[in-house]
């Protein structure tokens, strides 16, 4: 096998008679498919009882793949329970948020705290590892599948209490953390604590809780409980295979699991890219960067994407011509070293019967889906190993924090319409439209290498983050935060001082009032460049949802409200502590996109970090660099052709064309250039 | 009793003191009410314990009706459980889709698999039959009431497993039918199978299932389980009465029960006509035809309709003047031999307190409701026995299939906004507006008598249907199908070949891509008559929701898309295999009404089947024929008066007026003519 | 302590370290806070086990308040269960409408029928009363908190059956009351009766029931069950304190509890004022009047209001400048002798972390909230005892009836969009905009003192109400009712006569038809003053939702429909029985605001009851009178300044300004005048 971007995807030949397998592999060769993920949902046919394993089919599948010379991603087969297990041990089924013990059905359906599940899943992973470790072409172990959801059963309640004991040590500390005196909640025995659900602290669903503390801790506990499922299986694999990377497929910006808590336990980050629609380019770029940020910038894999259409949405369009190629190259541009599909052959029945695949029900190789996949396979082959292991040279960091996500969205007040992704993606989009290479990093990340750090809606401030942000400013860098940031500590209790409690001195500003308004109310904010020559207003942009009335305590006023009783009061400020170069921006309202873009570009201006095509927001440029070699990916997401001056000299790897910096590039819709610079 | 259309309805004198009964009957005579349905909800007062029956009140009710010389429809009284039974045997109460065992309440509330219910309901039906068989005027037995709903209890789970054993014989066949390998669902013991519910395979309600196979089978099982309740009671009746027709009241186009599976077990089809609003004329016509189709075109009964208003809707308007008469005659026009109301006297309390009745709370006979009912009674008397047993001379068939309904709507992908009734009613409306006499028939129907057969959205193709449709084409007939037809087999597994798998060769076309779009996206389809002289476009009509890109394999292109990346590609085709007269139309998108009308009229054109007033879409004409005598019903649904040329000579039965073909008929809004032709 | 309006609110120092207490009291003094409510959610720290009480903290809190010379409202601490109790006795937790037994969580969470709760709550109330009775400054006992919700557990089922036995005596009477023969519901044993819930008689939530009778009785039972919780605790208090007023905080127009059934058991009415938005002035006025009506017009307390913002809404704006003052004076204007906040210091954590408070998280006294509260404190001090105990001199009564509320909204038919508050508030608004002093009274109230009595949407007529209304008319007064009034008796069964069954002869009209239409349909009603000189139409106003076609039986036609098949038929009538002065108005449709205003003003016209500023609808005037001294409160709710002629001479208590009747008053937005007349 040549070293190149792994290309292929999920393959379930156990669902088909063996005569189909030959046609499959013939087609795979046509499309340059070199990697197959097998066994993800194979538990039922690998194990038919507690002590009854049967690897006959999997042996044959693996043998055939080896014979064909392809690479293998081998699953531990625990993505769905087999019926016999669910029947024999009802505890392995989840109890949902409504308190209902489920019976057998669906997938991703195990209780993470079930001792039976823990024992049998690890045993299966161990058996599989024992049998297939060392298989030629085995490039990764795929544990479980798309971990997610939550369980509220008595086993989980017991595990939660143990988790709390480990976190708090004693009930006094727990009661203080949860502010339990409020509403008579002082716990006097660990067993009094119930999982927060529709039967206990919640109403109107998971975001409405009487006690944010217990809900936040249950979110953390659930993430940890599933992580334990992963590490149990990983440990079982490691008994038989000391080195092949072990991973599982994440789901991008997925709220239930704190991937930052998981990252250190994975050898490799991978994720499944199912964007909500065909206008999700910026969002996908963000998510690629978030996934890359899990392992300190190391390349990740796209473990799944659909070649054509999904089936699970209310409306499932096919991908338009060229989209598969464009999005696949976008993944590579942001750090992917594998581009994999779900799946190779379309399901015969059940709920993914209409989910697209490289091969359709007929197995035709003249479909648009197959043809586009084969074309892409050829291009990836042409690129070869050029970008494997390459990194993104980012000088801008965007903080992302599951705790803040949870805390902001389970808060009662001020405004339920504020969502963490909306705000974070708003700031990301401003960076993306300016072609800025950036990292999306956890709040614990080393910030020493960044000139600019954005921390929008960072509701919760933990550990030494404030100091590390202050250090960015101290060395001349820029930091930015927004409304509702710095409000609560690690336990979701308010800082007992002026808002933004965790950030007041860093940003030189305090919040006098926090007003909230319905979605259809806008308050125009007039923004003025604090370093502008004439002091004239640069832009008026609408503020929405939350309007904090700011009182500068050192900061300069950059934006003021234009309406309501706080018209004329500060809405946006910038602080240069000690008058030095560093800057701390505070944005007290949810600005519309033009306002965010203005703030971000103004903040970036002094650092020379704007990308090459800031005036073409749909023209994406992203760089990967390895040992001094830079590949510049140019991706045109617009609907019409465009002409721009080349931002660099080099050679387009896909066509061999030599490009001189400054020459006119004519890009058709969905065009891709992969320019080896130099 | 004179032979005539049965006229009357539900009568519950047990809810009233006996002094009211005399007033009731006096009023009935005024209104020519000759038929009363009694005992539908009488279980509690007929049986007060397992062995305690009391027929005193029913005896008196029946005796009084007999004395008045009216006809009786006698219920088996099992439409609602009595409290003592629900308390003594909690198993008779249903467990709902959410897994909640219900307690006593409402009606139509029994678990169909409950042994106790099965035993006691049959026992009660037998007792009643034993006592009242041979009662003068007894014209039908009414078993249960509006069967429907579903249960998910352990008794149902056990019965479902038995049903599956009978269907599949062994688990290998079941696993194959359900494509169980997908998501690790291979069953190794029948007891592992759980009813598909919110606790097992479903999310977001009954239409979202991980496994279509089990859900489809549970729908079939539920229909059969309730059918067994019906046949249990029928068998008990037949022990005492060998011949009086046994029926139950259906609910028209009602998804939970496959009435085609029931039809052979009923001696007579009856249904309750509660249209959603006052613009449901076409829908009611369709439903009458569907009900008539249950018994091969034999006349049916309208078992219930409201004289004035419903109570169960959010908004319950009164029927406008003339509407009761117009709709009642529409029922007769489509094959009704009975026109019955729910109910005769308005309830004193509970949830039907405001449901309209022939007699209101006061018992006035000068209300509009009573007056209109009495006028209609007089007209029906005038018609006499003229149409009893008459048939509809249809040469067009519209296929209707519960399996396709279920399969299309529980499918994941391509588009949840597609509903089976929308599509079928769309094609029906085109026929109705063209005044075409038609039958709505099951897919197993004998198609030999039809010139044109429409099979819109026939997602599932079973048995020899394709061959029977091909035979229609072979003898010069026309068939038509639409997008998403022919996709799955009887188990809801995809045909492993080009789409429409079951239909590809018949229609001479294959589907290259199936795109789906949100409700607000339209793709203009340009339609051109394939037999037109100039080849010019006849019409451009919008396609919605699903756009199949077609590849003709023999067929002529009739319509092409005008937008998106498949602009110019075929959307509608017509195939004349062997160049002969027969034609097979395929419509690859959900055309707007004008497009459907164009396609339907073009397809009908060669068969001379357009009705007499195709340019007056709201003028309905429907024919009933018996022994060579034709009655032509002319129903004017428009809001304004209209003038048309009489399409036939004859005599209006209602007025005695003699009509000459071609003379001008002036019709006021809601006018009805019943023309005895000749 | 000076005698004045009690000013302060909920205070929870147990949630704070003692060093904060000093700062609190210092701030309270600045703001003239003289009253503190303590202990509402203190159960967990007062009682840590069945026999373990600990009053250390509460002793200290009370001692400090006494030392500061403030007044105390002392809670019985049963507003939320402690965890140990919920764990030891799961029966104290509620079972919800869906049949789910809850576990520990939230507040207001006890089962009212739990013997354990009944025993322990009374025991705690008794202990507290024993300890703190006689405390200096103790002005009231606050039992529980915001009673509400419902429980459906087996203890409640048993208690419900006892309640029914007491109400009906035997099952025959119950079956008749519930019209149980309908749908086979005849009960033969009390134990067959289940609470009406989603598992029994209901679908689509609490308003959709198969049997209105059982649902109505369960609402009454629930109200009574919670009342028993209150009276249990009150009795325990009275063992130790014979005279200090005992109360609990109501929630205004709160559907689940029939406050009229509770009123006689309270020594004082109090309520929590959280209006839905900033345009709720009329609604708040109504609610103040409703609360005042609970105790025959005696002053009430505002037990809670927020100084700035709520937290529990989706969107939580801050109160605009001046609003807190305006609304607080509105409360006093309508009879409040206390103006209290929730709460004094903002919560550190949990779901009220962002609920506003007099002191914020920092404890600043320069916030707008604190400053406005302090200013108001000064004004209240200035008013002193001038209005304590004063009454509202109302000659107009508006009937309010929980039974009619429930019956109208749980009815199937005619129109689910009709809500009792909408209709009642519509008539109230017409009165409010005309500055009419009015009482909101129960249907059992003595009507002898009123000139005008309005009874809109009085669906249920009980007892001798009709006679008492007739007496109003007989002595020359005016009564008014609307569509859907007079329809059902105390059991929610229809009166078996012409509609409005209970009212036909009183209003001299009957309802021939009751049409219902969707929200977007309007029927223009032309209104003509029956006493007008020229008989010309005075106004055409839209009717909505329900259109009753009226047949006068003695009444004059005042309004006629302009559309639909009943165009020209009567919509509004007025009856002058015997041609005497008294009048009975019947309004057969839900008139738009202009129509209601016309009807109300026309009806009032003969009684000289229009207020001083009928042409300034946002200018509120309300009077309180004590021993011949009248205070006239003038409240300007408009957004712009206004000038009016003073309606009275007197002195503005707030400014000392002397006002002469007729002089021009210039009012800025949110201005308040408290004019001591004379």
Image: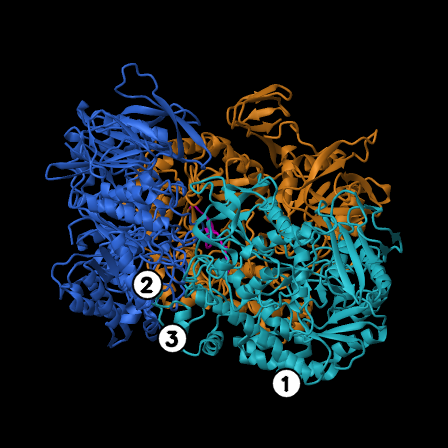
Chain colours: A blue, B cyan, C orange
Does the stretch in magenta take in B671? Answer: no
Q: Relative to the observer, which residue lies in front, B265 or A50?
A: B265
Is most of the magenta stretch helix, strand or loop?
Answer: loop
Q: Callout 2: helix, strand or loop?
A: helix
Residue B172 circle label: 3
Q: Chain of mark 2?
A: A
Asked if marks 2 and 3 touch (Cβ < 8 Å), the reply is no
Cα separation between marks 2 and 3: 48 Å
Q: Relative to the observer, which residue lies in front, C280 or A296?
A: A296
Does the stretch in magenta take in C142? Answer: yes
Q: Relative to the observer, which residue lies in front, B630 or C556?
A: B630
Q: Is residue B381 left or right of residue C547?
A: right
How many circles with numbers are drawn on the protein?
3
Residue A192 circle label: 2
Q: Residues within 10 Å of mark 2 (few under 14, many from 20)?
A: some
Q: Residues within 10 Å of mark 3 (few under 14, many from 20)?
A: some
Instruction: Look at the picture and state if A480 lies above or below B618.
Output: above
Asked if marks 2 and 1 touch (Cβ < 8 Å), the reply is no
Quadrant position of the N terminus of chain A in the picture = bottom left
- Mark nearer the viewer, 2 or 1: 1
- N-terminal of the pair, mark 1 or mark 3, is 1
Q: Is residue C589 left or right of residue B508?
A: right
Q: Residues within 10 Å of mark 1 (few under 14, many from 20)?
A: few
Q: Quadrant of residue A247?
A: bottom left
Residue B51 circle label: 1
Q: Quadrant of residue B565?
A: top left
Cα separation between marks 2 and 1: 50 Å
Q: Which residues are magenta?
A: C137-150
Tell me if I can see residue A80 in this picture.
Answer: no
Q: Chain of mark 1?
A: B
């Amino acid at each position: 096998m040549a070293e190149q971007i792994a290309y292929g995807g999920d393959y379930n030949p156990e669902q088909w008679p063996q005569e189909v397998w030959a046609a499959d592999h013939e087609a795979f060769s046509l499309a340059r498919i070199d990697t197959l993920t097998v066994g993800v949902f194979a538990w039922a046919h690998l194990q038919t009882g507690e002590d009854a394993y049967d690897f006959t089919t999997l042996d044959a599948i693996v043998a055939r793949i080896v014979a064909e010379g392809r690479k293998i991603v081998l699953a531990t087969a625990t993505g769905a329970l087999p019926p016999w297990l669910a029947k024999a041990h009802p505890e392995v089924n989840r109890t949902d948020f409504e308190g209902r013990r489920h019976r057998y059905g669906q997938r991703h359906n195990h209780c993470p705290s079930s001792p039976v599940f823990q024992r049998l899943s690890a045993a299966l992973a161990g058996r599989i590892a024992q049998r297939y470790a060392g298989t030629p072409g085995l490039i990764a172990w795929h544990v479980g599948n798309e971990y997610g959801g939550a369980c509220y059963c008595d086993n989980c309640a017991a595990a939660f209490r143990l988790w709390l004991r480990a976190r708090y040590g004693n009930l006094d500390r727990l009661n203080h953390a949860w502010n339990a005196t409020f509403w008579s909640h002082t716990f006097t025995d660990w067993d009094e604590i119930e999982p927060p659900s529709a039967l206990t602290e919640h109403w109107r669903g998971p975001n409405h809780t009487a006690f944010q503390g217990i809900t936040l801790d249950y979110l953390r506990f659930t993430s940890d409980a599933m992580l334990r499922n992963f590490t149990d299986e990983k440990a079982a694999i490691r008994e038989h295979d000391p080195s092949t990377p072990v991973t599982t497929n994440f789901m991008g910006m997925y709220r239930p699991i704190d991937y930052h808590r998981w990252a250190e336990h994975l050898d490799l980050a991978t994720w499944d890219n199912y964007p909500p629609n065909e206008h999700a380019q910026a969002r996908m770029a963000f998510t690629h960067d978030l996934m890359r940020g899990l392992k300190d910038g190391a390349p990740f894999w796209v473990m799944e994407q659909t070649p054509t259409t999904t089936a699970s949405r209310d409306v499932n369009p096919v991908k338009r011509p060229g989209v598969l190629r464009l999005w696949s190259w976008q993944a590579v541009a942001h750090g992917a070293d594998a581009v994999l599909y779900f799946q190779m052959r379309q399901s015969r029945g059940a709920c993914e019967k209409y989910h697209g695949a490289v091969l359709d029900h007929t197995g035709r190789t003249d479909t648009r889906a197959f043809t586009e996949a084969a074309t892409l396979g050829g291009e990836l082959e042409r690129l070869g190993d050029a970008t494997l292991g390459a990194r993104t040279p980012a000088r801008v960091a965007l903080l992302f924090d599951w705790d803040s996500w949870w805390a902001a969205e389970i808060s009662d007040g001020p405004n339920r319409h504020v969502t963490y992704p909306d705000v974070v993606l708003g700031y990301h989009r401003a960076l993306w439209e300016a072609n800025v290479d950036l990292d999306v990093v956890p709040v614990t990340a080393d910030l020493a290498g960044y000139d600019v750090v954005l921390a929008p809606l960072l509701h919760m401030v933990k550990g030494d983050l404030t100091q590390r942000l202050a250090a960015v400013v101290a060395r001349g860098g820029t930091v930015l935060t927004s409304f509702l940031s710095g409000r609560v500590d690690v336990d979701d209790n308010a800082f007992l001082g002026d808002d933004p409690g965790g950030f007041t001195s860093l940003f030189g500003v305090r919040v006098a009032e926090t007003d909230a308004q319905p979605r259809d109310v806008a308050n125009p904010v007039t923004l003025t460049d604090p370093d502008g020559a004439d002091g004239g207003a640069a832009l008026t942009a609408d503020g929405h949802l939350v309007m904090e009335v700011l009182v500068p305590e050192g900061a300069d006023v950059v934006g003021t409200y234009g309406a309501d009783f706080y018209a004329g009061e500060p809405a946006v400020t910038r602080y240069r502590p000690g008058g030095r170069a560093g800057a701390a921006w505070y944005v007290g309202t949810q600005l519309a996109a033009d306002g965010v873009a203005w703030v971000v570009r103004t903040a970036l201006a002094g650092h020379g970090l704007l990308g090459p095509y800031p005036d073409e927001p749909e023209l994406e440029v992203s760089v990967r660099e390895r040992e001094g070699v830079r590949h510049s990916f140019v991706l045109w997401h617009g609907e019409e052709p465009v002409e721009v001056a080349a931002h660099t000299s080099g050679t387009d790897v896909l066509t061999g064309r030599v490009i001189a910096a400054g020459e006119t590039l004519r890009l058709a819709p969905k065009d891709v250039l992969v320019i080896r610079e130099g």
